[in-house]
Amino acid sequence: MSNTMGAFVKSLLKVVGDSVSGLHEPVFLGNEKRYLDECIESGYVSSVGSFVGRFEKDLMSYVGASHAVAVVNGTAGLHLALVASGVLPGDEVIVPALSFVATANAVSQAGAVPHFVDVNDETWGLDPHALRAHLGKVGKKSGRRLLNRASGRPIVAIIAMHTLGHPADVLGIARVAEDFGLSFIEDAAESIGSFAGGQHTGLFGSVGVFSFNGNKTITTGGGGALVTDNEELAHRLRHLSTTARKPHKWEFDHDEVGYNYRMPNINAALGVAQLERLPELVMGQRKLFTRYQIELEGYSFGVLRSERPGTTSNYWLQAFCLGSEFKGARNDFISSCLAAGLGVRPMWKPLNSLKPYENAPSSITPVTDDLYGRTICLPSSAALGFPHRQT
Ligand SMILES: *Cc1c(COP(=O)(O)O)cnc(C)c1O
């Protein structure tokens, strides 16, 4: 076994070299410093300034959305999406058991209760068949509402997530949402640059949410954005993100309790420069997959996570999935990599096993538990896709 691990570490080092070794470092190739300078010169670094509007416009055109609202981070974006979709305290929202904790936390922050459902072993996103079967079993129709038989609470929305940048089965999930009368929100935090059937992720439900945290494909330092084709919803998102202030030249008049969620101009300045290079960065992440594939192809103890037919993945995080018989050795693999300076990580612990959520409603989650036990996330910075270029 230690031979196997030694060979694995050696292969990874061939790809990573001694250049970048964290899990996902940002890459600044273009106008970042110039726009930040411009922003500081202008004096508008905060919630007013031209970069925010420009960032939203550029994002709309890249994604193909009619509306975009830039916010302070992805978690705030998810919270806003839930509130604007009419999710109320005491409601339940379907969340994949395999996700970063922010997906569930946003639901809690809206006063609602996450209700976990298992993922599919090919997409690693919500499994529409498991979802339909689970809702059929635990749900009970009451007029136009769907109630959880056990808790008595209404189930009102579904959040799907595109795990590591690979699109979930969005059409299948959208059909379940429609059949059960639920809102459909996409946590597209990891999937800027990922498409399903030619359409950008984030546009399959009523609203999609991106994150531009420092470890994502492009970064604004901290930041996020919501995209939607629904004009009324876009208005409401913008209104709620800016303290629900009524447009007026000088009066401070607010018509409901709003949030201070608007992206600051200085973050948007960084974002405009990053968006200009997005196609290149995605290409870097995709090339990195090929580089890992060449090194890891021969190994019988596991496989590299690859793109599903009919989808284009941004390959945000590269992942190596150990065969079932090697599951017990995951932590040893991780320790060996870390000792060699390789910034690898396991997947997130299943959300329904975390302390704040251990009593939350959940389906059984064998696929989530299995993937968690077998997967190692590899160093994934786009810079590793261009090993011969100075960045
Ligand atoms: C990064 C991430 C978020 C949260 O984004 P922040 O900008 O860090 O708040 C939400 N969901 C998923 C799946 C993520 O990976």
Image (cartoon, helix red, strand yellow):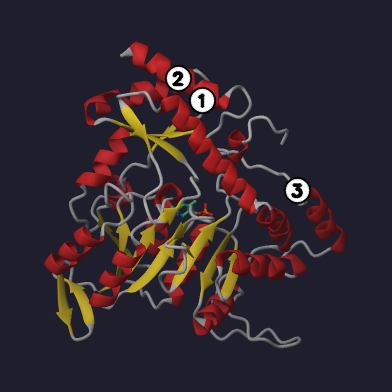
- Residue found farthest to the top: 3
Q: Quadrant of the C terminus?
A: top right
Comes first in the chain, label 3 or label 2: 2
Q: What kind of residue is marked 1?
A: Leu
**Residue identified by numbered label 1:** 342
Image coordinates for residue 316, horizontal then vertical, percent: 50, 45
Which amino acid does the dot numbered 3 rest on?
Gly
User: Under tag 2, what secondary structure?
Assistant: helix
Mark 3 and mark 1 residues within 8 Å of each other at the beta carbon: no
Q: Which mark is residue 226?
A: none
Q: Is residue 49 visible?
A: no
- Label 3 CB less than 8 angstroms from ligand 1: no
Q: Quadrant of residue 255?
A: bottom right
Please tell me whether mark 2 or mark 1 is closer to you in this view.
2
How many angstroms separate mark 2 from mark 1 (CA)? 8 Å
Q: Residues within 10 Å of mark 1 (few under 14, many from 20)?
A: many
Q: Is residue 136 visible from the viewing direction of this image?
A: yes
What SS does tag 3 mark?
loop
* Residue under numbered circle 2: 9
Q: Is residue 153 above or below residue 192?
A: below
Compared to 52, does 101 lie above or below? above
Is residue 332 shown above or below 354? above
Q: CA distance from mark 3 to mark 2?
A: 33 Å
Residue at figure coordinates x 74%, y 65% from the top left: 51
Depicted 121 relative to depicted 43: above or below = above
Numbered tag placed on residue 30 in the rendering: 3
- Most foreground residue, 352 or 293: 293
Residue shown at the point (60%, 69%) measured from the top left:
60
Pick whichever of labels 3 and 1 is earlier in the sequence. 3
